[in-house]
Each structure stands twice: as C-alpha cells, then as structure tokens.
Image (spheres, helix red, strand yellow):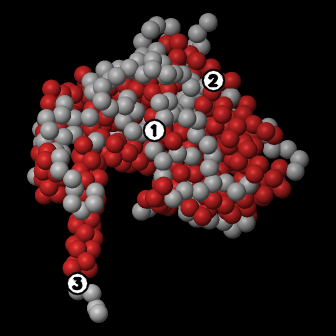
Amino acid sequence: MPSPNQPSTGERRPRAMVIDRAWRGLGPGPQALSGPGGAPLTRTVKLIVLPLVVRPALRPELAADFLDARESERLDALIRESGAVLEATAQWFTLLKRTRRALGIVAGNPQDLYFQRCFELATERGAPGPGADAVARAVVEDVVDASGGRTVEALKEHLADAARRARLDAGLAAAWDGREAVPGAAGTGLAAEVLEACGAAGADSPAFAAMVRAEHGSLLGRALWAAHPADVWDRPDVPPHLGLTAHRVPPRPEVGRSASTATLPAPFDRTLFERLFTVLQASAHREQLPTVPELVRREVDRSCAPLGLYDESLRVTVVLGGRLAVGLDPLGLGTFVAGSTAAHRIVNSRWQREASVLRARRMTVSLRPDPDGGVLNALAQDLRTPWAAYMRRLWVRLHGRDVRDAALPDAASAWGVLDGVARSVMMDHRARVRTALRTLSATAESAAEPRSA
C-alpha cells in the first residue's frame, strides 16, 4: 500500500520534493538537522540523507532528479525507516556542538565536520546515553586533529590507520558489488544537438536538460561496467571508455597510500588516495572543500558510481565531452567529418591554426623519419589520438566540481567547461612542443661546438 506521502499515479516527482515531504513526516525528532520551516537543511540532504540513507550508488534507481511513483514510495520508506537513527543523529549533533563550544573550538562548519560522524555514532550506539560526554569529546578532538588541514599530508595521515583502511576497503567492496552493469547505452543524438547549439554564441539547448532527465550519463557509466558495452561514439577505432581506463572493464577502486603526478593512472583506475590527491593538489580554495575525513567518506561511494561521479549533469557532460572528443581533428585528416557539429568546427579550427600542429601535420603526412630522434613525432602522435588527453582532463575537472557540489545547470555552462578543457589541452601541447624544440636546439648547438684539443 503506498505511503500517504506519495502519489498513487505514475507521475514523476522531483526527488528533492519527495525527500522534503518524507522528512517532515518524521516529526520534531531530527529538529537539529532541520531548518526553521521543518525541511531538512541542505547539508543534511547532501551529507546524510543522500550518501548515508539513500546511497544512490547502491540504489541507482533513486539517483535521478525525478522519480516515478514506485521510486518515490521506496525513497519515502527509506527515510521513514531511518527515523530513529536520524533522531539519534540530531541528538549527537547537539551534544557535539555543546562539547565543541566547551572546548573553545571555532574553526570549521559544525555541520560539515560532525553530521556524518553523528550518523555513524547513531548507527553504532543509538541515542546518547551514559558515557556520551566522553565519546563526544573524543570525536570532537579527533575531528580537530584529522581536519587541521585539507592537504595531501593530512590525507596520507588519515589513511595510515589500519583499522580505518579496512573499513574503507569493506565500504568500497560493498558499493562495487552493488553496481548495476547494463549492456548498451543511450545514443548520442541529443549530444550532437547540444553541441550544435553550443557552437552558436550565447546559445543554449533544451536537449541538455532532456539528457539529464533521461540519465544519459548514468546509462553510459553502467554500460562501461558491462562486459560488452555498445559502441556509442560511431567510431570503431576508439575504445568505448575513451582512455578513462586501461582495462576493458574498469576495476574496483582500492584505498591506496600514495600518488605521484607523473605516474597517475587513467581516471577510472585510480585509488581513493589518487582521486583525492588530484583534488587537493589542484584546489585554489581548499577551505571550500569538505574536511579530509568527509572527502574520503564521500569518495567511497562516488568512486563506485557511474563514471565515478555523483551529479547527473556532470555525467551528461562526460557524454557530451566524449562526443566532442571523438570528433577532434587537429591534423585536419578528415576524421569523423560525418559527425561534425558547430562545437567541433570551433575547436578544430582553433587547433588547426596552431603552428606546432602545422609542423606535426607535415610530419604526419610526409611519413618521413623524424630527424630529432622521435620527440616531435611522439607529440604528433598525441594529435592523432586527441580524445585521450581531452577526456582525461575533462574527467578530472568534472570530478573536482563534483567534490565541491558544483553542478552544471545548463548547456551553456557545460559548453564553458568543454571548451575550456579543449583550450587547456591545446595550450599544454603547445608548451610541450616549445620545450621539445628548445631542448633539441640546445642539443644541436652543443654538438656543433668545436671540441677542445
């Protein structure tokens, strides 16, 4: 029998509305996690309800922004079944805030710091009872120690604890086993429509929102988990995963202990440590990131989610990026002409005007041995498979946005990211060519100098 909070028809409802109604139905118990009007706080939804109660990575049918009647009923039931734990979570949060004030701690947002720890306490211990004050003090002091800095060193220290690593590994195993691998994926017809519209200055496309609603990004991610994903790019010469993994099927993420910028594997093959290493290394405003313990906890489910991302708009941008990437043609060889869109023409025109690309094109067309010993030839080879570097950089950028909860609301904002990544890859290639030419020039001059008697 459907819950009184949910419709009995087949209409689709915003997930946020379903969560709001189910939460209000819990009554005053979790008041410390609610706003003045009784709705769950934004951080309550992001830090507790979605990752710890709903767990979209394990229940992909509840990951969409819009749910049908059956899915709405399931989500409502999950929240109602968690009512006692959520009430205990609110009680622990009140106690931890009081303990924090008594210790004179003012750094950090208490919701970011304690929400998920309080849920863990509520799950393991129930409501605060005898000895709760000592437990609260220990937790607050532990959080202070662990979140003293959002740095790679802090991440390394956090993951050095053997018991914590074992818990994280078990969480990764459970999330990975709960995936849904589905052969085949949504076509890229709508993606072409979006990219055609994005090529016009200031233009937007309703097809982007349609792709998000239809979960095209999730469909692609689940197809890549299948043993034989369908070819969605109309390019038999490129792998379906576009170089985001070195394997036919992405492997289960490991916890990891270290990382090196020079030896980072493909994005889907990275450990938990390596995924967060890139975020901490690249973040100019680290104070906007969650604390290190929260980063790690969230990354467990995220790393096992479709395309390694939570937000569907970011997953859809991966689909758009893939459609753009397989049509990149810096050398002007006529690759993928049939699938060209306005976005392709803009990016390819920019690439093909590059002096370094013109030289690489001459080398490629002539097929003569590279007189410099192969350095520039290797750079020319990068231009023959531009989709690899493009997709790698795009995923890292989208992952950083996902960690910061920075969704892409429309096609225009998605195009800003896609075009920005294309410019970044092009400029990086230009810098590498210049470095190679300087090195070769210095080597030639050194060889031309007369030897002393």
Please determine whether, in this image, residue 35 is positioned above or below residue 208. Answer: below
Q: Is residue 386 left or right of residue 37?
A: left
The mark closer to the camera, 2 or 1, is 1
Residue 385 pos. (x, y %): 28, 42
For disc 3, the neighbor class at 10 Å (few under 14, some 14 to 19, many from 20) is few
Residue 159 pos. (x, y %): 67, 54
The structure residue drawn at horizontal position 75% and vertical position 51%, both measured from the top left corner, is 162
Marks 3,2: beta carbons within 8 A = no
Q: CA distance from mark 2 to mark 1?
A: 34 Å
- Return the residue found at the far front: 453
User: Where is residue 436, by image quadrant?
Assistant: bottom left
- Circle on res. 450: none
Residue 453 pos. (x, y %): 29, 93
Give whichever of discs 3 and 1 has the lower sequence position: 1
Q: Which residue in the structure is indicated by mark 1?
A: 245
Q: Which residue in the structure is indicated by mark 3?
A: 449
